Amino acid sequence: MKALAKLYSQPGIWATECEIPEVGHNDLLIKIHKTAICGTDMHIYNWDDWSQKTIPVPMVIGHEYVGEVVALGQEVRGFAVGDRVSGEGHITCGHCRNCRAGRRHLCRNTTGVGVNRQGAFAEYLAIPAFNAFKIPDNICSDLAAIFDPFGNAVHTALSFDLVGEDVLITGAGPIGIMAAGVARHVGARNVVITDVNEYRLDLARKMGATCAVNAASTGLKDVMADLGMTEGFDVGLEMSGVPTALRGMLDNMNNGGKIAMLGIPPNDVAIDWNQVIFKGLTIKGIYGREMFETWYKMASLIQSGLDLMPIITHQFPIQEFQKGFNVMGSGQSGKIILNW
Ligand code: NAD
Ligand code: ZN
């Protein structure tokens, strides 16, 4: 089968041929229709320090996809050939304490599709049926292909009650932009999002942000004054991984504010802990998606009218994958879909 793989220990990604994966007793074999490029794929493409330590070579990468079930292991129940599915890319052990408590996203033994095991940038993908999620008929395949990062946005945004609250999102990457859409959809009052990339700030406006601010030129105090906010933000969603963005968020939270942190900062970021203590802030780290509450919420958010389509800015046939990686690397894009 055709696949995109990290074939060499250097920057880049390569088209290759490999074996169709074996289907274990509990697995589904999925014929891939659409995939999307994730920030993680860009790290692997660029062959940064993390990738060099983490990714075995050769490795078929990719974990954002939608496809069709073409074969089932003999133990699989609840799926049929022809089902349209996406899937949770974190494969969990099922026997650690968190798994057994139903907190699968906190499994200590997680492996990642397209990171530690063969990925979805291929004609076929085999995953445990447990990890597959059936896509309702009224959700289009373009959106289904981005359920993985949409799930990061939903998991983070729904960590705290947003109804009537003033929400600050730092980082208008694809995930921050989707989180802005979710926050508005569920009833936040003001949704302020920051970035330093004007293209992405524009996308965030299209997705419903009340105010999309260039952090390089505009201070949050001025934004709050314009919006008539006198006290500070109630909820913060950190989605940039940038230390100055986190510090700015801490500065502008109201007392008792709640912060959900998805962005992955560099090691050893210093913050002013007095902000956390004397403001009585709650900070929650977010990893992955809740299995499978986040997935049901994603489907329901779309079915209840959340329009996510603006986040998909580019589509390429798989033969033009290099163009996709180039556009993604330029920062002038939302989500990019590769059609198989
Ligand atoms: P991204 O890199 O596309 O988005 C980050 C954005 O932050 C960029 O648009 C960048 O321009 C912006 N930024 C840079 N400096 C800034 C500043 N000073 N203030 C505000 N914004 C600034 O990433 P993404 O794919 O949207 O993911 C968001 C973050 O979440 C990343 O850090 C990613 O590594 C992380 N992530 C975490 C998980 C998890 O499970 N915890 C899962 C996926 C992604
Ligand atoms: Zn586990």
Image (spheres, rainbow, N blue to C red):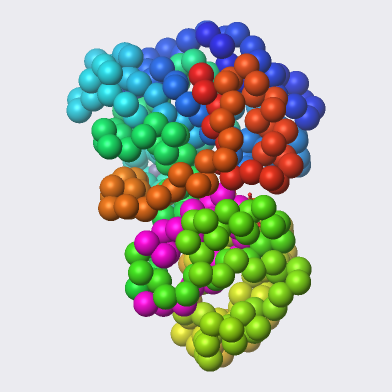
- 104 to 83, vertically: above or below: below
- Residue 183 point in image, percent of width and height: 42, 64
Between 192 and 287, the one lying in front of the other is 192
Is residue 167 highlighted in magenta? yes
Question: Does residue 206 show up magenta in the picture?
Answer: no
Q: Nearer the viewer, residue 230 or 39?
A: 230
Q: Nearer the viewer, residue 267 or 227?
A: 227
Query: What span is in magenta?
Result: 164-185
Question: From the viewer's perspective, is residue 286 above or below residue 131?
Answer: below
Residue 76: x percent and y percent?
24, 23
> What's the residue at 71%, 75% (across, down)?
218
Q: Is residue 75 left or right of residue 86?
A: left
The answer to which image quadrant residue 262 occupies is bottom right
Residue at point 34%, 41% (across, down): 95
| Left-right relation of 157 to 232 | left
Image check: 317 left or right of 94?
A: right
Say which quarter of the image contains residue 130.
top left
Question: Residue 263: in sight, yes or no?
Answer: no
Tell me what residue is drawn at x 31 percent, y 45 percent. 299
Locate ligand 1 by image quadrant: bottom right
Question: Residue 35 at x, y = what percent?
Answer: 51, 29
Q: Residue furthest right?
A: 10
Image spot of residue 220 (x, y percent): 64, 79
The residue depicted at 35 percent of the width and 21 percent of the height is 68
